Amino acid sequence: MDDTLSFALVFIIGIACLAAMVFASFGGDIDVLVPGGADGSLLASASAAVQSDDVSKTVGQFLISFDYFKNVHTTVLDPRQEIRVLDVEIHSDSNRMYAATDRGLFLSRDGGLTWNRFVTSANEITDAASMFSLISLSSNGDEYLVSVFSGGVGTVYRTRDSFFSLEKIIDFDGEVPYDMRLAGSELYLAMSSGQLIAWDLSKNHTRVVNAFRSPIVRIYAPSDGKVYLLLKSGTLLKGNSLASDFKQVRVSVLGFLPFWKGAKVLRLAWDKSGTLYAHAAAGVWKSTNSGISFALLKNIPMQKKQIDALAVDGTIIHVVSGTRMFSSYDGARHWKVTDLPNKFKVSNIYFTGDRIVLSM
């Protein structure tokens, strides 16, 4: 390559990098809307169309083990139809489990070994309703908040008696909270419209805190003291609190550069020390500094570079790829391989006590 061609190539790369930096300076976080929006309103956000495929797709089947997969139990919610599990709530002191799905609510009283459809007394939640988020409000497992989409309306309900009766808290025409998080006296709602809404439980008042160009599918509050939002676009955002401004976290070895986009994130997990693990389609990324920089875990002994599920139980990291689960007990330095009997793609991993639940 002659000197003229080399100079031209370096010049073009330099101009491209400069343009990317300028773009970042004037709003490189493409999914983040400036407070006030383009028309002076925080309501200038994404389309409010509600889609159950904004979260992990599943077929309503579970693998359950009480002894770290020495023995595995397989169960299905309803063998007659395909069901997408959108959230699972496991009561820590009993065998009661709830599965929120795109076909309503399911209840297990034996740790997930058998399931029954649960229809509320006034038919607020039937098999025609999609339940997106389910959070416990009490230690006895009787009080919950649930996010339901039915008949074109998204509604947040509160139950104080394990779903035998529901109290409507707030509803939205044509949109629904995909996730919810309590912070003090406020309930934060991650909306399918891209809005982050705060509802004051004591004053019965709502306010739009922030808005983004993509639906918010998850709210995370890890042990590093920060708050993270995951958008449907795969963008990961970080703030000091749910009421604060959010900045994009770029999952890449070059994430500290303002013009570097980074990998699309599918899930975020963390251990007790605050170390973050970001699940991207082709790998797992690790950060020990609250997402300022990430390192790709290259030593997971996978045959294919495709991650199906990621979760952390205390300090134990679990990664599922195909029909194998890779577990690390020493911070991702070494991995134990476990063969799984799953016939479908694993989408999520849940823990309670000595129980591990894989949903498909």
Image (tube, helix red, strand yellow):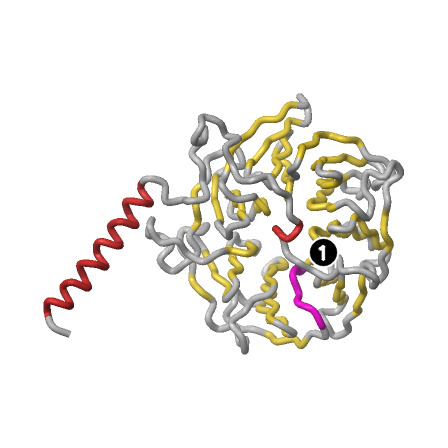
- Residue in the picture at 61% in, 35% down: 188
Q: Residue 317: where, in percent of width, then height? A: 58, 64
- Residue in the picture at 73% in, 42% down: 136
Secondary structure mostly seen in the magenta stretch: loop
Answer left or right for 325 relative to 236.
right
- Residue in the picture at 85% in, 57% down: 115
Answer left or right for 176 relative to 27.
right
Outermost residue, top side = 203
Quick check: is 348 in the magenta stretch?
yes
Outermost residue, left side = 3
Q: Residue 184: where, in percent of width, then height? A: 62, 32
Which residue has dot 1 on it?
Answer: 84
In the displayed structure, 224 sits above or below 45; it is below
- Say what amino acid the circle numbered 1 marks: Arg
How packed mark 1 is, by other alpha carbons closer than 10 Å (few <14, some 14-19, many 20 or more), is: many
Give the position of the N terminus as an image quadrant: bottom left
Q: Residue 286: where, in percent of width, then height? A: 47, 60
Give the position of the C terminus as an image quadrant: bottom right
User: Picture quarter containing residue 337?
Assistant: bottom right
In the displayed structure, 205 sits above or below 115; it is above
**Magenta segment range?**
343-349
The answer to which of 284 and 43 lies nearer the viewer is 43
Q: Secondary structure at mark 1?
A: loop
Q: Residue 123: where, in percent of width, then height? A: 85, 39
Quick check: is 148 in the magenta stretch?
no
In the displayed structure, 162 sits above or below 276; it is above
